[in-house]
Image (tube, rainbow, N blue to C red):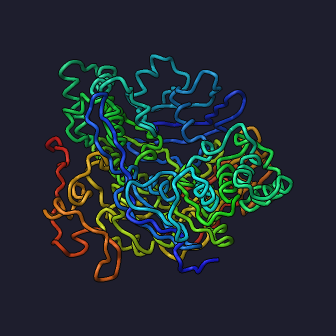
C-alpha cells in the first residue's frame, strides 16, 4: 500500500540560498511521526514547501505525493481543496494564526463551509461539537468569543478545532505547544493523542523538544541543515541514536535525576546556509569527524532494520541498542 | 569579601499591584502580580524561580533589581535597603547587579557594535579609563567564549548563542555580585542552551556571582540551581533543594508541573490539570490553586495557606493538604471534562 504522503528529493531555495537540500520522508496512514531539529534545519519549510505555502520567490523542486498523486506545484484549486481538507496544519502561535476581528465560531464554520459544504445552523452545531471535542470549556458560548478573549491554550484548541473541521487524514502540527505553559502543553499533547486514537488521523509533529516528541510519536526524523540525518522508531532514537548529532542533542538535555555536572554541549553553531561545508554539514561540530567526512554529504543509509542514518561513522551498535531495536 | 553565609540578597514580603481597566469605561480592578514573596540568596548560589506565565516570577526579578518598586515589603542588598530607583545611590548599587534577558536580539542595540555595548556599563559607572576599555572588553568577550574581534561586529552578525554570550559579557562588565537571568535560554536552540547553562555555571564558579534564575523549564532549573522556588499566582507555593522538589514535590501544583516535564521513555502517570492558568485579575479565594487542584477540600476554598515548614521533613510548602491540616478532598474542579458524544 502506498504511504499517505511520500516526499522525495525535496529542495527549496530562497534567492539561490538552499533551505532544503534533498528531503526524503514518508508518512503512513494513521502514523505519528516527529520532525525534530533546531531552528533553520528545514523542519517547517519541508511542510510549507510540500503544501505550496512558500512565497513565490522560493524555488521548490522534487516530488511530494499524496497517496501516489503528485501534489507539488499542483493547480491552486487542487491545493485549496487539499489544504485544510485532507491535510491540515496548525502553527506555534495560535493567536497570530487566528483572525483577531472574527469570532471563533465564524472561523470554524468558514472551514466547515469550505471543506464540508455545511452552512447555517448545521455548521454552527458542528462547530460547537468540534469545540467540545477539543475540550473547550463552555463551547456554545465560546463560538461568540473573539481570540483575544481566550487564553493561549484555548486559542490553540480553537486552532485544532478548525484543523479538524475538514476531517483531515494528516495533521501537521508545527511546534503546537511551544508558546504554551507546561501544564497547558500537557493538555494539548493529550488532546492530539486522543484525537488520533479516535479518528485514525496521521500526525506530523514538528518540534525542537525531544521530550515532547518521545511521548507523542512512534517514529522520529532528525533534521540538520536542510536534510534528514536520522530516521528511526522513537524508542530506538532515545535508547541508541546512530547519528552523532542526534546523540549530541540527547546528551545536551539536562537530566532530571542523577548527579549534576556540566552538560555535554555541542560546540559551535549550525553552519550558515550560504557557507555549507562540502561534506557532512555536521562535520565541523562532530566529535567523530575524520577526513573522509568532508568528501561528500553522506546519504541516508540503513544501519539496522527500520533505522537509517546519514553518517559514514554512525555510533556503534551496543548490546543496549540491540535490545531496544529487537 | 563578606562571609559566604551572609545573605547577599534578602527580599521580604514583596507585593506588586497593578490597576487595570477592562474596556474603555470598565471598572478599575486591582491585579496582584506578586503577593507576598520572600527570597534569600547567598553569594555564589543560584535560586531557581519556576512558574507559568503570569505567576509573577519576572516581576519579582524586576523588584529585586529595583527596576520596580514594591508596593509592600522591601529588598535588602548586602544588608542595605534598596534605594529609590533613579537616585545616585541606586545607580551605584546597580553596578553590583545585572540582568540577562530572554531575547538577546531585543536586549542588544542593533545599531551599536558588540564592543560599544559591552563598554557602555563601564562608561556609565565610570569604571577604568577610556584607554584600557578595549582591553577590558576583549577580556570580557573571552570570558564568555567569544573572540576579542567580535567586539567590532553588530548583533545581526552573530548567531543566537553568540548574542546571548554578548549579553552576558555586558552583564558581567561591572563585576556584579548578582545576576538576574529572566528565561535566559528559552529563546535558544537545544544545543546552544547547554552551552549557555555551562557558561553561567563556569562564570559563577569563577566569580562567585549569585544568580536568580527565572525559568519555566524545570530541567534547566535543576541543572542550574542550589534552591528552587515554585510560584503560582504571585506566591511561592513550595521551596527547597531542587532534587527534593523535583523528585518528591509536596504541593499539588508542583506535582503537576513535575509530571508535565516531557520525558523520553515515560510510561503514563502524568497529572493533566484541568482548566487554564489562572488570571491574576480574578484571583480565587483561599488557596489560589484550589479550582485546578485534584486534592482540594472545602477549607482550601476559604483559607489561604501559609508558606511554612512541613513537620515531617522541613520542606517549605503552602498547602493545607500537604501540612495535614485537612484530609485530601476530591477536588473542587468546577470545570467538568467536556461531554463526549456517546460511544
Front residue (pair A246, B130): B130
Front residue (pair B65, B242): B65
Q: At which x and y percent is residue B1?
A: 65, 77
Q: At which x and y percent is residue B246?
A: 41, 70
Looking at the image, residue A209 sits to the left or right of residue A129; the answer is right
Residue at the (68%, 72%) spot, across then down: B206
Q: At which x and y percent is residue A313?
A: 70, 60
Q: At which x and y percent is residue A321?
A: 54, 68
Looking at the image, residue B95 sits to the left or right of residue A324; the answer is right
Residue at the (26%, 57%) spot, across then down: B288
Front residue (pair B216, B74): B74
Looking at the image, residue A227 sits to the left or right of residue A166; the answer is right
Q: Residue furthest right?
A: B131
Instruction: Note whether residue A319 is visible.
Output: no
Q: How many marks?
A: 0
Is residue A38 depicted above or below B237 in this figure? Answer: above
Instruction: Note whether residue A166 is visible.
Output: yes
Amino acid at each position: 500500500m502506498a504511504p499517505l504522503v511520500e516526499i522525495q528529493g525535496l529542495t527549496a531555495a530562497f534567492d539561490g540560498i538552499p533551505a532544503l537540500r534533498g528531503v526524503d520522508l514518508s508518512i503512513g496512514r494513521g502514523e505519528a511521526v516527529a520532525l525534530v531539529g533546531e531552528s533553520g534545519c528545514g523542519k517547517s519549510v519541508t511542510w510549507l514547501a510540500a503544501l505550496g505555502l512558500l512565497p513565490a520567490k522560493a524555488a521548490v523542486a522534487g516530488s511530494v505525493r499524496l497517496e501516489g498523486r503528485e501534489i507539488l506545484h499542483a493547480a491552486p484549486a487542487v491545493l485549496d481543496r487539499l489544504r485544510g481538507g485532507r491535510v491540515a496544519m496548525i502553527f506555534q502561535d495560535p493567536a497570530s494564526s487566528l483572525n483577531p476581528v472574527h469570532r471563533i465560531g465564524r472561523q470554524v464554520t468558514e472551514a466547515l463551509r469550505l471543506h464540508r459544504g455545511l452552512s447555517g445552523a448545521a455548521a454552527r452545531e458542528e462547530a460547537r461539537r468540534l469545540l467540545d471535542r477539543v475540550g473547550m470549556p463552555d463551547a456554545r458560548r465560546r463560538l461568540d468569543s473573539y481570540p483575544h478573549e481566550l487564553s493561549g491554550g484555548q486559542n490553540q484548541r480553537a486552532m485544532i478545532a478548525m484543523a479538524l473541521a475538514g476531517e483531515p487524514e494528516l495533521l501537521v502540527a508545527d511546534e503546537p505547544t511551544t508558546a504554551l505553559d507546561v501544564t497547558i502543553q500537557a493538555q494539548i499533547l493529550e488532546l492530539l493523542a486522543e484525537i488520533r486514537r479516535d479518528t485514525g488521523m496521521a500526525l506530523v509533529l514538528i518540534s525542537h523538544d525531544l521530550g515532547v516528541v518521545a511521548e507523542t510519536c512512534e517514529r522520529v526524523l532528525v533534521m540538520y541543515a536542510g536534510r534528514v540525518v536520522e530516521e528511526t522508531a522513537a524508542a530506538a532514537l532515545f535508547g541508541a541514536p546512530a547519528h552523532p548529532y542526534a546523540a549530541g542533542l540527547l546528551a545536551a538535555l539536562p537530566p532530571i535525576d542523577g548527579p549534576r555536572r556540566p552538560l555535554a554541549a555541542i560546540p559551535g553553531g549550525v553552519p550558515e546556509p550560504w557557507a555549507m561545508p562540502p561534506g557532512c554539514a555536521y562535520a565541523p561540530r562532530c566529535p567523530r569527524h575524520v577526513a573522509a567526512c568532508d568528501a561528500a554529504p553522506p546519504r541516508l543509509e540503513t544501519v539496522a532494520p527500520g533505522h537509517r542514518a546519514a553518517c559514514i561513522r554512525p555510533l556503534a551498535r551496543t548490546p543496549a541498542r540491540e535490545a531496544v531495536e529487537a | 569579601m563578606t562571609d559566604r553565609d551572609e545573605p547577599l540578597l534578602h527580599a521580604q514580603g514583596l507585593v506588586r499591584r497593578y490597576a487595570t481597566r477592562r474596556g474603555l469605561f470598565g471598572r478599575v480592578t486591582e491585579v496582584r502580580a506578586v503577593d507576598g514573596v520572600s527570597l534569600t540568596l547567598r553569594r555564589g548560589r543560584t535560586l531557581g524561580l519556576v512558574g507559568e506565565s503570569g505567576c509573577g516570577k519576572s516581576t519579582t526579578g524586576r523588584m529585586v533589581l529595583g527596576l520596580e518598586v514594591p508596593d509592600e515589603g522591601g529588598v535588602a542588598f548586602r544588608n542595605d535597603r534598596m534605594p529609590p530607583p533613579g537616585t545616585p545611590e541606586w545607580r551605584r548599587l546597580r553596578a553590583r547587579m545585572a540582568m540577562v534577558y530572554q531575547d538577546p536580539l531585543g536586549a542588544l542595540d542593533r545599531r551599536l557594535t558588540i564592543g560599544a555595548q559591552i563598554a557602555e556599563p563601564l562608561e556609565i559607572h565610570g569604571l577604568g579609563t577610556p584607554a584600557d576599555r578595549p582591553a577590558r572588553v576583549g577580556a570580557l568577550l573571552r570570558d564568555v567564549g567569544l573572540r576579542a574581534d567580535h567586539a567590532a561586529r553588530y548583533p545581526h552578525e552573530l548567531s543566537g548563542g553568540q548574542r546571548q554570550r554578548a549579553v552576558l559579557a555586558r552583564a558581567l562588565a561591572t563585576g556584579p555580585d548578582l545576576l538576574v537571568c529572566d528565561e535566559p535560554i528559552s529563546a535558544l536552540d537545544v544545543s546552544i542552551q547547554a552551552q549557555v547553562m555551562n557558561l553561567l555555571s563556569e562564570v559563577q564558579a569563577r566569580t562567585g556571582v549569585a544568580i536568580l534564575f527565572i525559568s519555566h523549564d524545570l530541567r534547566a532549573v535543576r541543572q542550574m540551581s542550589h534552591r528552587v522556588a515554585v510560584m503560582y499566582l504571585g506566591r511561592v507555593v513550595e521551596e527547597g533543594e531542587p532534587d527534593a522538589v523535583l523528585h518528591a514535590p509536596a504541593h499539588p501544583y508542583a506535582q503537576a508541573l513535575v509530571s508535565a516535564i516531557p520525558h523520553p521513555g515515560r510510561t503514563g502517570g502524568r497529572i493533566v490539570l484541568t482548566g487554564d492558568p489562572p488570571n491574576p485579575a480574578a484571583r480565587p479565594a483561599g488557596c489560589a490553586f484550589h479550582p485546578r487542584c485534584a486534592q482540594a477540600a472545602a477549607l482550601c476554598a476559604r483559607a489561604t495557606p501559609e508558606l511554612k515548614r512541613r513537620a515531617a521533613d522541613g520542606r517549605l510548602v503552602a498547602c493545607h493538604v500537604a501540612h495535614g491540616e485537612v484530609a485530601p478532598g476530591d477536588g473542587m474542579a468546577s470545570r467538568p471534562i467536556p461531554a463526549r458524544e456517546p460511544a
